[in-house]
Amino acid sequence: MRHPRQARQQLLGIALLEALVALVILAFGVLGLLWMHQQALTQQRQQLMRSVATGIADDLAERMRLNAPQRAMYAKAWGNATTAAPDCSATACSRQDLATWDMQQLQQALQSQLPEGDAAVFALTDAPNWWGIVIAWRDANETYRTDTTSGSPPCPTDMSCWRLFFRPDR
């Protein structure tokens, strides 16, 4: 027969072990919730970057439609800086100056709205009178990638890209 004191100590030891197991299970549950929250924030940020890229590309496409005769002046490769242009919002500009000003506005939007934002603007190789705009932003996970369809420049390393094809003359 056991002494009542030994039985009570054994029960306290088991209760302590049960409490530790419950604490470990709770800790894993909280860590899982934190991980899911981090993943949701990452996806939300990427969706925001994609939405901003879509807006920038749509804005440039509309500018090119309004100045379609000068569409060749909008061509741009990755990393090419734009030249200085007169402020066409304050003074009347020629169509050439307007194209240069539009590209300067593009560069400002990329720098202010996307992390390490960049753009490439190109004529499609397999569709006459069609153009493409590819917007890129810093993303080590490369969440959104584009292929080289129709002469699209490849998306730079450690960047995500979003692409738009359109006809400036329509």
Image (tube, grey):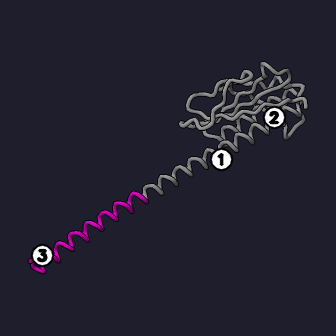
Q: State which tag comes first along the sequence, 1 or 2.
A: 1
Cβ–Cβ below 8 Å for labels 2 and 3?
Answer: no
Where's residue 106, x and y in %? 74, 35
Task: Give the residue type at disc 1.
Answer: Leu
Mark 1 crowd level (few <14, some 14–19, many ≥20, 10 Å Cα): few
Front residue of 62 and 101: 62
The Cα–Cα distance between marks 2 and 3, rounded to whole angstroms, is 83 Å
- The vertical placement of 53 against 32, above or below, is above
Q: Looking at numbered disc 2 in the image, what kind of residue is underneath it?
A: Ala
Residue 154: which quarter of the image?
top right
Please count the marks in the image: 3
On the image, the x and y values in percent for residue 3 come to 9, 79
**Helix, strand or loop under label 3:** helix
Element at label 2? helix
- The quarter of the picture where the C terminus appears is top right
Residue identified by numbered label 3: 6
Q: Which residue is mark 2?
A: 61
* Three-letter code for the amino acid on which mark 3 is drawn: Gln
Which residue of the protein is positioned furthest toward the bottom in this rendering?
Answer: 4
The Cα–Cα distance between marks 1 and 3, rounded to whole angstroms, is: 63 Å
Residue at 61% from the left image edge and 49% from the top image edge: 44
Say which label, 2 or 3, has the lower sequence index.
3
Horizontal and vertical percent position of residue 168 = 86, 30
Q: Nearer the viewer, mark 2 or mark 3?
A: 3
Queried whether the magenta region covers residue 16, the answer comes back as yes
Q: Nearer the viewer, residue 94 or 46?
A: 46
- Which residue is under mark 1? 48
